[in-house]
Amino acid sequence: MERVHKYICTLISAFFLSLLLITFSYAAQVKGIYVTQWTLENTTYLHYLIKRAKSAGINTFVVDLVKPNRRYQENIRLVLDNKIKYVARIAMFPGGGTQDQVSNPKIWQSKYPLIQQAIALGASEIQLDYIRYNTKQKASVENAKRILKIIDWYKNKLTGQNIPLQIDVFGIASYGEAKNIGHNLKLFSQSVDAMCPMVYPSHYEPYKKHAITPYETVFDSLTHIQKQFSKNKTPFKLYPYIELSNYRYPMSHAKKVDYIKAQLRAVSEARAEGWYAWSPHNRYENLFGILENDTGVTPKNTTGVTPKNTPPL
């Protein structure tokens, strides 16, 4: 009887320990939003973003760094003072590189001074975007090898400073090598700390099908990444980018909310280590509302200030 009692106690303890670990894991998840440099330097709107982000449990800002200035420095400090992690986003080849650009170290190494400045300002990780060829390039297995050379160069630079490297990749590369743009996740896997697949339903063909199946699009993409590795376990952290609307099709407010919720659920159920939300104009009212459990019905932007060229919700 005593053995049975001990066995039951052990089972109960194990259950609550696993529950605690799951809870801790969820709490420690990366939950981030993309912020342009223009938005960062708009101090009034930045205060609003920080307030709403903290209320919603957002813990990371992925911030563009194009040209540092005094206002950028001051406002990054504001982000850090509010205990929000600063990840610097550096666009390597805006629009995608050409053969000449990718093969010229003088061109792609020119971004390193920006990275050094980001680290000096407090960036805890570096995210390289547009680390690829443009989509018009001829498909070749050599393309990914040339991109890997660039990744390795930056990884070596950052390793000595204990700064993790993230890279953004096309969602379609979830299903295998994208030979025209030079994305091969298995090839890159030992050279990055985190992979950020842009699993936007609006970017998958057929477009209409994926527009109405956001959960399946995101979940299938992430699980196909995992299947490329032993025991479905990636050697890097997985922080997919999700989108807050589908630019190809108009959506009502309610449909946008459901669209976002479906993607968030897919990321969670695929067991990714976190996510980043992408809004080109940095409008996150719907996302904040969902995370604050108020469904985003009443946006709380009381500043009267919105980012430049912002479309309606």
Image (cartoon, rainbow, N blue to C red):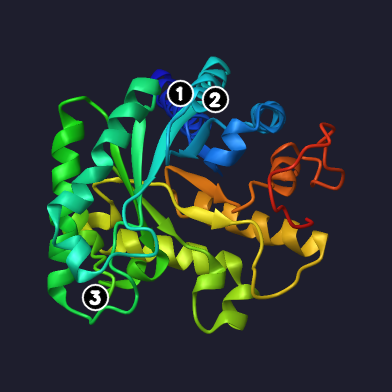
Which of 142 and 176 lies nearest the eye of the viewer? Answer: 142
Circle on res. 102:
none
Say which element carries label 3: loop
Number of numbered callouts drawn: 3
Circle on res. 71:
2
Circle 3 is placed at which residue position?
179
Say which element carries label 2: helix
Q: Residues within 10 Å of mark 1 (few under 14, many from 20)?
A: few
**Do the CB atoms of the residues marked 1 and 2 lie less than 8 Å apart?**
no
**Which amino acid type is marked by label 1?**
Ser
**Which amino acid type is marked by label 3?**
Lys
- Report x, y in % for residue 111: 27, 43
- Report x, y in % for residue 74: 53, 19
Mark 2 and mark 3: span between their CA atoms? Answer: 41 Å
Give the image quarter of residue 140. bottom left
Q: Residue at x 21, y 62 (%)?
A: 101
Q: Is 287 placed left or right of 237 in the picture? A: right
Mark 1 and mark 2: span between their CA atoms? Answer: 52 Å
In the rendered structure, which disc, 1 or 2, sits on the residue that comes first in sequence?
1
Mark 1 and mark 3: span between their CA atoms? Answer: 50 Å
Circle 1 is placed at which residue position?
13
Q: Is 213 placed left or right of 198 in the picture? A: right
